Amino acid sequence: MDGRWILSICIVLFTAALWRFVTVYWWNPRAIVAQLKKEGIQGPPPRFMVGQIAEIQNMRSAIKDHDMESFSHDVFHRVHPALLKWQKQYGKRFVFWWGTEPRISVSEPEIVREVLSKKFSQFDKSEAELRLANLFFGRGLVFVTGEEWSHHRRLVAPAFFHEPNDRYNRRVRVSHARSSGEATRRKNPEIEISGEVRQITGDVISHTAFGTSYLKGQRVYEILSKKVPELVPKLISFSWIPGFRFLPLPVNLRMWKLHQELDSLITGIIDERRNSVKSGRSNIYRNDLLGLMLKECDSSSNFTSRDLIEECKTFYIAGHETTATLLTWTLMLLGGYPEWQERARAEVHEVCGNEIPDGESVSRLKLLGMILYETLRLYPPANEVTRECVEESWLQDLHVPKGVSVSFAIAGLHQDKELWGDDAGQFNPDRFKDGISRSCKHPNAFMPFSFGPRVCVGQSFAMIEAKVILAMILQRFLFRLSPSYRHNPAMKFGLKPIHGVPLVLSKM
């Protein structure tokens, strides 16, 4: 009898698994394709289980092997070559498949506004996106949903909503002085600038958010910005396999090992702060990001030690990499357009003289803000926003069934000539002279940090940090693009200059 019961249970479990497999991977995709086709939305036919993942990855990978022939900033075809191909073939609205997840690509700012703001409760982070992202960064603020997201957001927000203070400016001064001192000691005036700004921004976020130094967090940055991204293409290639993240594949074993090391490093930083309070070296945890999270962890059962470690991972990489990439592209543009560099330097000298910008002067650096906005428009830190429809919804005249995602290609919105004019692919900071809302035909066509309730919590911090560092560089150096510079913006864990940005510096 026992054997029969075991056999019966096995048959039931196998039948249930088979039914789910057929439903998820065969029946549902065909039903959704038929439904969307009736509404006039077509796209490339999905490959069984894989969808268009392989085609998207292969086209992006091929782009990296070819430098751009001219110093052009029209980069949509390099960021989303597959989407551009399908847009030409099927129109501005089309459906493509990320594994078994259907994504409707939309490039209309009014629909963007509805999804991210007006109908925020009807759309959430997609399951496929979360499963993959959690492998890279863990479950931090950017990758949690619902009440968990609301709780984490309320907790961390106060750490980022403040004006630059003396401690912040002093850390920027020390970091920049160390970096520029090393640059001027070199016999060769040429410097690869992305590594320099990455060290400066790493030191700033380490000190202001975690109360430690760049050196102590250096291995954390190395893992999150170099080691993990090296595994991303392989992880994406396997992401269509059911339960792949639990399989002992070589790529998963390597990722698990990296996260074990990350947990150990971050736990050491946390324990050091805790011990400083216990030993009496400090009376309080302080009000930086780590201090706020430690207070919550000690007083609330809704924010565990695991949550604390995951948030540290998120903000180490988000607070470091985004600003470093923004500054790298900005310096590339100012190195290539000396007239804009001189205008920016003149503003810095007029507003700040030789002093580091404080809270008042940062707000008066209008031209620097325009230059940074134009850099974010041409080279956005995020390339795509995807939201899954959690309840059947209408977006203007677009019907979105439950379970279907809506996808916005940010580079496409940022360089749409219908929205920005014929010079959409050109560097022209003056388009922001009257503010973001008047820079183009629709204010929601500019979304480097997203917008709505899930807008990037650190965007003000990032812009202030970028302004301060850029102002200090302009005060101290003249620079131009090196003749060895190769213009090759492509996707590499975000939009990056594949060959770096070599600048030729001369001290003021």
Image (cartoon, rainbow, N blue to C red):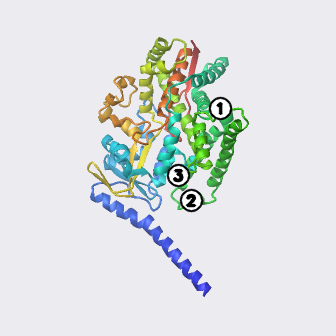
Q: Residue 278 or 85: which is nearer the viewer?
A: 278
The quadrant in which residue 7 appears is bottom right
Q: What residue is drawn where x is 71% and y is 32%?
A: 281
Q: Tags 3 and 2 in contact by the CB under 8 Å rule? A: no
The quadrant in which residue 244 appears is bottom right
Alpha-carbon distance for marks 2 and 1? 35 Å
Alpha-carbon distance for marks 3 and 2? 10 Å
Q: Which quadrant holds the C terminus?
A: top right
Of the two numbered discs 3 and 1 in the rendering, the one whose residue sits closer to the viewer: 1
Q: Is residue 65 visible?
A: no
Q: Residue 78: where, in percent of width, then height?
A: 45, 39
**Sequence-first disc among 3 and 1:** 3
Q: Residue 353: where, in percent of width, then height?
A: 51, 11
Left or right of 165: which side holds 393?
left
Residue 132 - label: 3
**Sequence-first disc among 3 and 2:** 3
- Amino acid at the residue labelled 1: Tyr
Left or right of 357: which side holds 428?
left
Q: Which quadrant holds the N terminus?
A: bottom right
Q: Is residue 239 visible?
A: yes
Secondary element at image label 3: helix
Residue 244 - label: 2
Q: What residue is drawn where x is 36% and y is 29%?
A: 436
Secondary element at image label 2: helix
Q: Residue 349 or 75: which is nearer the viewer?
A: 349
Q: What residue is drawn where x is 46% and y is 57%?
A: 99
Q: Residue 449: where, in percent of width, then height?
A: 44, 37
Residue marked by disc 1: 214
Q: What residue is drawn where x is 47% and y is 58%?
A: 50
